Image (cartoon, rainbow, N blue to C red):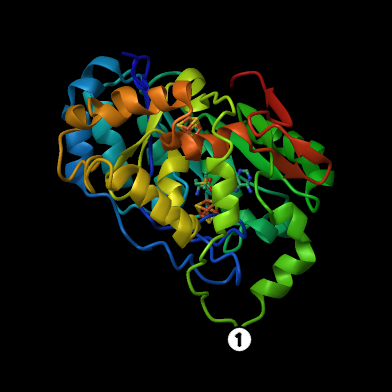
Amino acid sequence: MSSYLENTSSIQIELSSKCNHLCPSCIRTDFKTLRHTNPLLEVGQEMPMETITKVIESQFFKERVLEVEFCGTVDEPFAHTKFLQILKSFVNEKPEIKISIHTNGSLQNPEYYQELAQVLVRTSPESVVRFSIDGIGETHSIYRFGGNYEKVITNLKAFIDKGGRAIWQTVVFPWNENQIEEMEQIAKTLGCVGFFARPDRTNASKWGEEKIKSLRYNKSTLQSKPSTGDQDYLDGIFNSLTNKTSCVYKDTRKMFFISWDSRIWPCCFWSNIRYENLIKREALEATLFEKYETNFNSINDFEVDQILSHSFLNNDLIDAWRNDKPLKWRCVEKCSLKKVRTSDGEVDDKKHLKQSYFNKI
Ligand SMILES: C[S@@+](CC[C@H](N)C(=O)[O-])C[C@H]1O[C@@H](n2cnc3c(N)ncnc32)[C@H](O)[C@@H]1O
Ligand code: SF4
Ligand code: SF4
């Protein structure tokens, strides 16, 4: 038997369904209006401390975990009202742990970022915060709707000032690609340890700045109804099961994912199915919750170690990859067929367009 988790040493955690931004192609955003939240997402929810305690007390965490990454698909980590308390709980249990955080950098104040740095400098020397900054000045908020460039830079400076290791991470769009060199230079001058430019993995580049702005500022538009989805598209995925699956979460990142509602998933793509459309939601129900039980992966109902030894993660997913079973449909969709659209055509999602590390300060 081969377990999905046999080499796992990291956890990726989505702490809430809260964020102060509405980035146009983030799954938390209503993609038809760009001004409301996704009607399929229950916003404003936070993971309870009890879940964190159960993770920390698990045998898995104690024996195996070397890294915790705070990076969800619908959350801003610093929107969780107890973020610093949660961080300290992990660090108190394992002082040497590597912590990675993805943030839009625009919530909280400089004192908060200073305290954050003071906690992180006591952990692994590789701990890092990635600040998502998608352009200089007003360009930043074309994608980061609700963001404020000056505020992010002030917080970034406060963090670096207290010894925090920061990476400036930008998503490359047609409207900011002419700023890449300048962003890299500013990152270096501010004392960031690195600069990453990632391809846009969504439709935002294809929509373009004009369409994004015209949708966003059309104030009469109400929140959309949940999207039904496309049965032919889904059937096409189920008809493509012979595609080879290579799992970046299992093999490269060696991590699994915990969503804001305290469920354990192989990766964020599985958790996200619920927010895409109703047809996919039903497919998730049929392939997981009807096959097993509705709460089989919920930390509210089971211990972390019990969920990790459940047959889904322990055997069935890998068996589905090897034997082309329907259970692997999401993996086929996300990791076998997927290409990323950019203004230059299609690129591999896993590659950074640019990744530079500066001398450590
Ligand atoms: C959904 S965000 C959640 C964390 C945090 N709210 C943030 O935005 O940094 C997770 C990661 O996705 C990245 N991201 C957001 N939009 C993206 C896009 N269109 N293409 C590629 N990565 C994107 C973010 O920069 C961040 O590193
Ligand atoms: S800041 Fe992050 S979580 Fe918030 S809307 Fe943008 S990409 Fe999504
Ligand atoms: S969708 Fe499947 S193959 Fe892709 S990262 Fe997730 S578990 Fe791995």
The residue identified by callout 1 is: 220
Q: Is residue 50 visible?
A: yes
Q: Is residue 111 visible?
A: no
Query: Going by the image, does 100 lie left or right of 334?
Result: left
- Residue 332, by quadrant, is top right
Badge 1 marks a residue whose secondary structure is loop
Q: Quadrant of the C terminus?
A: top right
Percent across and percent down for residue 258 are 34, 39
Query: Going by the image, does 176 lie left or right of 229?
Result: right
Q: Residue at x 40, y 19 (%)?
A: 124
The residue under label 1 is which amino acid type? Answer: Ser
Q: Residue at x 73, y 50 (%)?
A: 136
Percent across and percent down for residue 171 are 67, 43
Q: Residue furthest bottom?
A: 220
Which one is nearer the viewer's eye here, 315 or 106? 315
Percent across and percent down for residue 143 are 66, 57
| Image position of 213 with respect to 195: above or below | below
Percent across and percent down for residue 205 are 74, 53
Which one is nearer the viewer's eye here, 245 or 84? 245
Q: Quadrant of the N terminus?
A: top left
Q: Residue at x 69, y 38 (%)?
A: 339
Circle count:
1
